[in-house]
Image: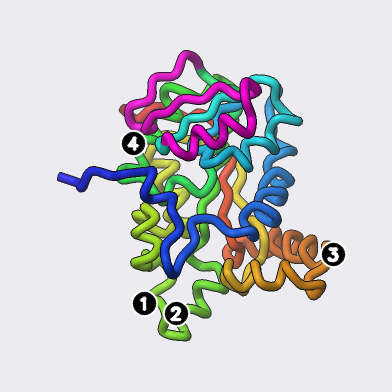
Amino acid sequence: MSKQRDYNVEIKDTADHQYAYSFDFDVMHPFMIRSFAPFFNQGSLLELGSFKGDFTRRFLSHFDDVTCVEASGIAMEEARRKLGDKVHFVNSMFETATLPKRYDNIVLTHVLEHLDDPVLVLKRINDEWLAEGGRFFLVCPNANAPSRQIAVKMGLISHNAAVTPAEAEHGHRCTYSLDTLERDAVAAGLKVVHRSGIFFKALANFQWDKLLNTDIISKEYLDGCYQLGQQYPDLCSSIFLMCERGNSQA
């Protein structure tokens, strides 16, 4: 039997590892939206794992009907303070959440790697929550990002897909690459329509945070890393699948 999880503890920074970095908020979030936007449907949005609402805020210019499901009550309350009644919040685990309808767009970013049974949740998305013609945006950190491959060569981690002790403290259960991410999506019955990477990345998040406080990195450089990531998805910070409803394999 798996250990009872405390999602309020998992989101806390530890002595040697932050849960979220400025790189995530200031660089990755805008580029994720840029990657998603061409595929957005009109209508409703369900965000699974809203954390403290910083990414959620970016959807409000695209959607009037936004629902967020978040397991951490502490994170959800902070998101609610930031966003108020612009968003409908549900404090629940995905495995047990009861939602009132199907959604035209569903977003799951940097969350799947935290789940004890990712295929089970992906099946719920496919079978219960995604509307006919709806689109599902799935993003995970990439095991094969150059920053991780360099860490292997430095002896800091054993292999690209390793889950470090610090990551495990934050609730990581696995580290996906494009092939294993697509494997789980297909196993859940989803139809993968588009696959890509988001942002070519050779430095660790903490190194990026230091650089972003200088004038070394320009907007043009960031844009170049994003565009290069379209050519080399397997060398990106994050990997991205856009899926539609497939046949249920229940």
The three-letter amino acid code for the residue at tag 1 is Ser
> What is the number of the mark on residue 158?
1
Q: Nearer the viewer, mark 4 or mark 1?
A: 1
The three-letter amino acid code for the residue at tag 2 is Val
Give the alpha-carbon distance from disc 2 to disc 3, as whole Å. Answer: 29 Å
Give the alpha-carbon distance from disc 1 to disc 2, as whole Å. Answer: 6 Å
Callout 1: SS: loop
Residue marked by disc 2: 152
- Residue 35: x percent and y percent? 70, 46
Residue at 38 percent across and 25 percent down: it is 97
For the C terminus, give its image quadrant. top left
- Residue 141: x percent and y percent? 51, 57
Q: Relative to 59, is 206 above or below?
A: below
> What is the number of the mark on residue 120?
4
For the N terminus, give its image quadrant. top left
Residue marked by disc 3: 220
Callout 4: SS: helix
The three-letter amino acid code for the residue at tag 3 is Glu
